[in-house]
Image: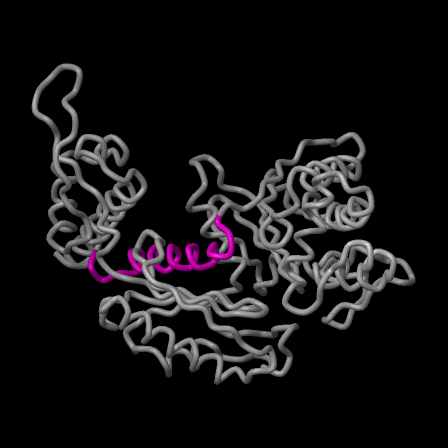
Amino acid sequence: MVKNNNSLNKLKYNNRQEVLDVVRSLGSCSIAEIAKCTKLSKVTVNKCLDFYTEEGIIAAIGKGESSEDGGKRPNLFAFNHNYKKVFSVKIDEIQILTALTNLNGEILASHTILYNPKTELDNILKSIHDAFLLLLNRQRCTEEECIGASFGWLGIIDPDTGICFTSPHYSHWGKNISLLEKLQNLFPQNMAIYIDNWVHFHAYGEVKRMPSGVDKFFIISSEFEGVNGSFIVDGKLYRGVGSLSGEIGHMIVDTTENAEKCLCGGRGCLEAAVSPRRILSRFKQDVTLSAEYSLGDGADNKLNFQRILQGADEGDPVLRKIVDKSVFYFAVGINNIMQVCDPGLIIIQGEYVAGGEYFKSKLAAKIKELSLHGMEKDIRIEYSKLGDEGAIIGGSLYCTDKFFENSELNSKD
């Protein structure tokens, strides 16, 4: 009898999950449409909808259009994005983006924290918690209305244990840090916490916003100092055995004697070869170029790199030579990725999104040139459309998906 009850409960759970997934993906739909997608009976779909509407997770939103044969207009249902909230965080090289979102990853309120890279970790965590309280107050929400929090971090993270093995750019934070434990001590005990490298969350946001059918790609993100990546396989994050998947910034692409030293201590890393900071540094060491192009210092560095990319896109021959060098090293790295995991689609995120058509077309051509002889294949290269908020959106959607996968709601009768 127990076995039968367990089987029935599992069936009921699976049916509810299927119905919820369809409603979330379609936006608005009728019982007939849900039944068609799930292959469940209309009676079963109706029971699942009754459960979710009673909980406030799905809402009846009115009537649809009659079929061509006439008849009653069907009732339409939609996922209630405002059922609960998610706290989502992205920590990059110079700032911390925090946001309160609805369950569709839409930002309701945000707060940016600028920080000194030398700031102690505990002080950073406290600033993040202060931002959480600020955003709740701004939205007039309680902690209980927040289903969980996602933390897009810098460094190599084990998402299962919440341990940060290392963060090369912030060595003073230490190694093997239990971020999960530290965050659990700050945030409400009943709040689910998810921690990962922020590029993984950005990749999750990309796949959730992708057209159906696109479920395998590699995303490369180049921020001002670092380069990182993430691999999506069958619509899911692939992290590898030791959570090292995507750490392409420390792939060796330059084996020459004068290869630049990377922050990790090695030489010839992709990060050292193509990071905007290194390119600007080399650019400014050339007195003639610095004078001719009037590049500024300090806070203007980010803008200056964009000007180099835009100038190359507009046809400036000197700036094109600089971009071409980056293209070469990127192509070597991407060619290596292709030989290992053959993603088919490469998404460029971060500073190089300003590269325009010139950077993208030159990169595709160079990759094709380096391809394995006799195995030439076209590689799609696209720029991310999610911008700096991609990790916020992806982290929020990841947290929401996990909530409904693990929720005790579905165990109710």
- Taking the spot 76% from the left edge, 50% from the top edge, the residue there is 326
Which residue ends up furthest to the top in the rendered image? Answer: 69
Which residue ends up furthest to the left in the rendered image? Answer: 72
Q: Is residue 326 visible?
A: yes
Identify the image quadrant of the C terminus: bottom left
Identify the image quadrant of the N terminus: bottom left
- Taking the spot 25% from the left edge, 33% from the top edge, the residue there is 39
In x, y percent, where is residue 129? Answer: 38, 78
Instruction: Determine which quarter of the picture holds residue 313.
Output: top right
- Taking the spot 42% from the left edge, 55% from the top edge, the residue there is 393
Residue 155 to residue 65: above or below: below
Closer to us: 112 or 190: 112
Give the colouring mode of the picture: one colour
In x, y percent, where is residue 197? Answer: 53, 64
Instruction: Determine which quarter of the picture holds residue 138.
Output: bottom left
Query: Is residue 8 inside the magenta stretch?
Result: no
Q: Viewed as shown, does residue 241 lie left or right of 27?
A: right
Q: Viewed as shown, does residue 65 lie left or right of 247?
A: left
Closer to us: 316 or 136: 316
Which residue ends up furthest to the right in the rendered image? Answer: 257
In x, y percent, where is residue 372? Answer: 78, 37
Residue interval drawn in magenta: 386-410
Count of all numbered marks drawn on residues in the image: 0
Q: Viewed as shown, does residue 293 lie left or right of 58?
A: right
Residue 253 to residue 277: above or below: above
In x, y percent, where is residue 188? Answer: 30, 77
| Prevalent SS, magenta region | helix
Query: Is residue 388 inside the magenta stretch?
Result: yes
- Taking the spot 18% from the left edge, 34% from the top edge, the residue there is 30
Closer to us: 242 or 206: 206
Q: Is residue 194 visible?
A: no
